[in-house]
Image (cartoon, grey):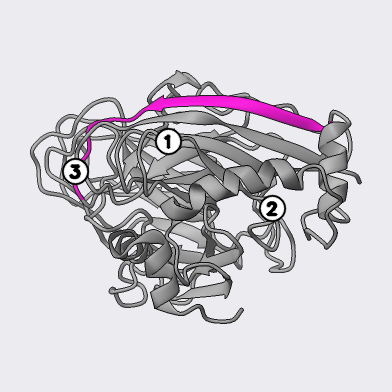
């Protein structure tokens, strides 16, 4: 994909937002020590097909940012959208649909699902990632993963997942959303929550994990189900951690080639609050071993010190896209059919959930909106 000039992106999103996205990718960190190890992640709220790489560079197709900002363009976008719906639209969406017109036709024939979401996030820490898995009200709060060694392979049937129906035939894709946030410059990462397992606290013993996810498990990098980009993260549950310094050491996993690997040591947080990640600031994913690009399954957990109280979940997710909010309390349209090379695939039984990566403020943030998903013909 072609590089996009920084000036155009900064004019569109603002310098603060661009800096925040680069921090989310760990662009200022060395490989294996906090830098994103997967493929570029799409900016689903930016027109065109714009992706951010592990180096913090923007690539793809972007025709905006010459003169206007996102806020300047917002009003005109709404007017154009209504006009465009009445005209045939040609060109290939590369998302299981034969064309954009095919996707619109499928939607008009009843192959779409619209699902409302309302999340009131937790109080956070500046520069630190929070999880929205345990908060409601819609979907209601999710539960902790089952205890080791089995853990929980998450599905859409789990309490806390965004509800939807698997298509009778074909594949389901996210094609649009309308969302607002109550705090400026916050971001959401929409991801498929694949697996979580509750760690026994107040122990320094190694603890085996035998459970595995049921999605994104292929070792073939051309498969839609490829392990690559699966990320691990360590989540504080419903009980804050005791004030004990600790690291997560000798934690092991299987990688994208189904080979055994060891996670680099991750620094935990003494007295970590509920719903934050027990990882350093500026880090929403646990760095993997050198050359690894995805995690298939956890195989072992271990803490360097016994933490007397607290709840920890070792999790695996697969990123679908970032949603950023350069304005507050305004319903922003996210066009995922035409804004990227392939509208995000929603696997059958996927467990859709959110992270708040690298919060710009400690303030509790309310997110309100809805997703639209449309199934492509087989």
Whether the magenta-drawn stretch holds residue 203 is answered as: no
Residue at screen point 37% across, 49% down: 326
Q: Residue at x 61, y 34 (%)?
A: 371
Identify the residue under disc 1: 330
Using the numbered discs, state the Cα–Cα distance from disc 1 to disc 3 in whole angstroms: 24 Å
- Determine the residue positioned at 62% across, 48% down: 335
Where's residue 8, x and y in %? 44, 73
Judge left or right: residue 295 versus residue 312.
right
Determine the secondary structure under disc 2.
loop
The image shows residue 185 at horizontal and vertical percentages of 32, 48
* Above or below: residue 112 compared with residue 208: above
Boundaries of the magenta span: 111-126
Mark with earlier residue (1, 3): 3
Instruction: Specify the quadrant that holds the N terminus.
Output: bottom right
Residue closer to the observer: 99 or 127: 99
* Pointer 2 or 1: first along the chain: 1
Q: Which mark is residue 129?
A: none
Residue with the mark numbered 2: 343
Q: Nearer the viewer, residue 255 or 304?
A: 255
Q: Is residue 376 visible?
A: yes
Q: Reply above or below: 144 against 199.
A: above
Mark 2 vs 1: CB contact within 8 A: no
Disc 3: which residue: 125
Q: Earlier in the sequence, mark 3 or mark 2?
A: 3
Q: Is residue 119 magenta?
A: yes
Residue density around tag 2, few if under 14, some if 14–19, many if 20 or more, within 10 Å: many
Would residue 213 be seen by someone viewing this image from the given angle?
no
């Amino acid at each position: 994909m072609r590089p996009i000039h920084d000036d155009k992106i900064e004019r569109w999103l603002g310098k603060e937002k661009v800096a925040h996205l680069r921090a989310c990718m760990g662009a200022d960190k060395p490989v294996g020590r906090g830098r994103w190890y997967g493929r570029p992640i799409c900016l689903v709220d930016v027109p065109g097909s714009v992706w951010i790489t592990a180096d913090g560079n923007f690539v793809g197709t972007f025709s905006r940012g010459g003169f206007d900002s996102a806020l300047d363009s917002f009003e005109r976008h709404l007017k154009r959208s209504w006009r465009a719906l009445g005209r045939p639209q040609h060109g290939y969406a590369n998302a299981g649909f034969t064309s954009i017109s095919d996707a619109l036709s499928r939607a008009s024939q009843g192959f779409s699902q619209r699902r409302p979401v309302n999340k009131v996030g937790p109080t956070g820490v500046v520069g630190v990632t929070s999880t929205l898995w345990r908060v409601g009200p819609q979907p209601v709060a999710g539960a902790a993963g089952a205890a080791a060694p089995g853990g929980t392979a998450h599905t859409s049937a789990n309490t806390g997942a965004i509800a939807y129906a698997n298509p009778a035939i074909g594949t389901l894709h996210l094609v649009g959303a309308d969302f607002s946030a109550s705090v400026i410059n916050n971001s959401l990462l929409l991801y498929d929550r694949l697996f979580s397992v509750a760690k026994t606290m107040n122990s320094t013993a190694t603890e085996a994990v035998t459970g595995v996810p049921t999605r994104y498990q292929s070792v073939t990098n051309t498969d839609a189900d490829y392990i690559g980009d699966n990320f691990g993260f360590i989540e504080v549950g419903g009980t804050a951690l005791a004030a004990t310094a600790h690291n997560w050491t000798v934690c092991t996993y299987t990688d994208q080639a189904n080979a055994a690997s060891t996670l680099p040591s991750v620094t935990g947080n003494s007295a970590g609050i509920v719903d934050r990640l027990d990882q350093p600031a500026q880090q929403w994913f646990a760095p993997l071993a050198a050359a690894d690009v995805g995690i298939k399954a956890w195989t072992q957990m271990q803490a360097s010190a016994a933490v007397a109280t607290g709840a920890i979940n070792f999790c695996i997710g697969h990123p679908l896209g970032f949603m950023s909010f350069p304005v507050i309390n305004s319903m922003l349209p996210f066009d995922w059919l035409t804004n990227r090379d392939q509208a995000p695939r929603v696997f059958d039984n996927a467990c859709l959930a959110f992270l708040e990566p690298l919060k710009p403020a400690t303030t509790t943030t309310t997110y309100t909106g809805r997703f639209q998903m449309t199934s492509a013909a087989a």
